[in-house]
Amino acid sequence: MWKRPKGWIRKGEDSAWLAELDKSCFKKAWREESFSRLMKKSWFRAWTWHAEANSKASAFLVVEDLPDLFSILRVGVVPECQRQGIGKEMIDFLIQLARNEQVPNILLEVHECNLAAQHLYFASGFRQIHRKKGYYHDPSGNALVLIKAIS
Ligand SMILES: CC(C)(COP(=O)(O)OP(=O)(O)OC[C@H]1O[C@@H](n2cnc3c(N)ncnc32)[C@H](O)[C@@H]1OP(=O)(O)O)[C@@H](O)C(=O)NCCC(=O)NCCS
């Protein structure tokens, strides 16, 4: 388990918990079966964030671990814990992990209208490399493709 000043980050190994967190954070949530199916993939990695070592998770991060790339599939902080630096802590954790494992890039897609997430990513050093038109439905919109090169 990885300890930071604010909280604890541990491997996310429980599909039911990941699905519950996903439901709290996203309007269009993934079902538990999707998480359990994805968890069987060799590239799947997930973590949860806890205020105390044994407390319930308040945030989660799901990543596709590809050759030379971490691709963020999901990151969310439950609404009552947002704006407390937890999202930044999760992203900082992933950046540090990429450094440790010599993964040169982190990639993600974000809805053009999701300004909160964009602020977080740009503040963490991501830059836009592409825009996917009409990528999202409900709510519809374009996706910004962002990348961070790990130095
Ligand atoms: C996006 C999300 C993960 C951010 O997590 P968070 O813990 O609230 O973010 P932090 O408190 O670490 O904020 C870090 C920075 O992000 C920016 N930010 C976060 N929320 C913001 C908001 N609502 N409005 C504007 N900027 C915001 C700020 O720059 C902030 O730094 P500051 O507080 O020093 O100004 C969270 O809002 C969330 O779970 N949203 C729903 C799910 C989602 O949209 N996930 C991302 C999909 S791509």
Image (tube, helix red, strand yellow):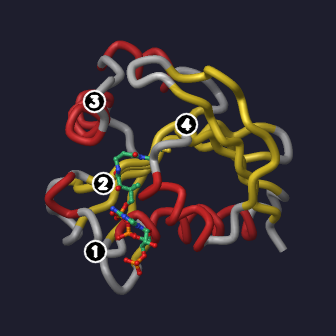
Q: Is residue 46 visible?
A: no
Mark 2 belongs to which amino acid? Val
Q: Which one is earlier in the sequence, the residue at label 3 or at label 2?
A: 3
Q: Which quarter of the figure is the C terminus placed in?
A: bottom right
Camera-side mark, 1 or 3: 3
Cβ atoms at labels 3 and 2 below 8 Å apart: no
User: Residue 69: percent from the left, percent from the top?
Assistant: 78, 46
Q: Is residue 131 above or below residue 35?
A: below
Disc 2 marks which residue?
Answer: 77
* Mark 1 crowd level (few <14, some 14–19, many ≥20, 10 Å Cα): few
Question: Any atom of ligand 1 within 8 Å of the CB at mark 3?
Answer: no
* Mark 4 crowd level (few <14, some 14–19, many ≥20, 10 Å Cα): some
Residue at 55% across, 36% down: 73
Question: Any atom of ligand 1 within 8 Å of the CB at mark 2?
Answer: yes
* Mark 2 crowd level (few <14, some 14–19, many ≥20, 10 Å Cα): many
**Quadrant of residue 81 within the rendered picture:** bottom left
Disc 1 marks which residue?
Answer: 84
Helix, strand, or loop for circle 2? strand
Question: Any atom of ligand 1 within 8 Å of the CB at mark 1?
Answer: yes
Q: CA distance from mark 3 to mark 2?
A: 13 Å
Camera-nearest residue between 67 and 114: 114
Helix, strand, or loop for circle 1? loop
Q: CA distance from mark 4 to mark 1?
A: 22 Å
Mark 3 belongs to which amino acid? Lys
User: Residue 56: percent from the left, percent from the top?
Assistant: 15, 54
Disc on res. 73: 4
Residue at 47% across, 22% down: 140
Q: CA distance from mark 3 to mark 4?
A: 15 Å
Disc 3 marks which residue?
Answer: 27
Camera-side mark, 3 or 4: 3
Camera-nearest residue between 54 and 142: 142
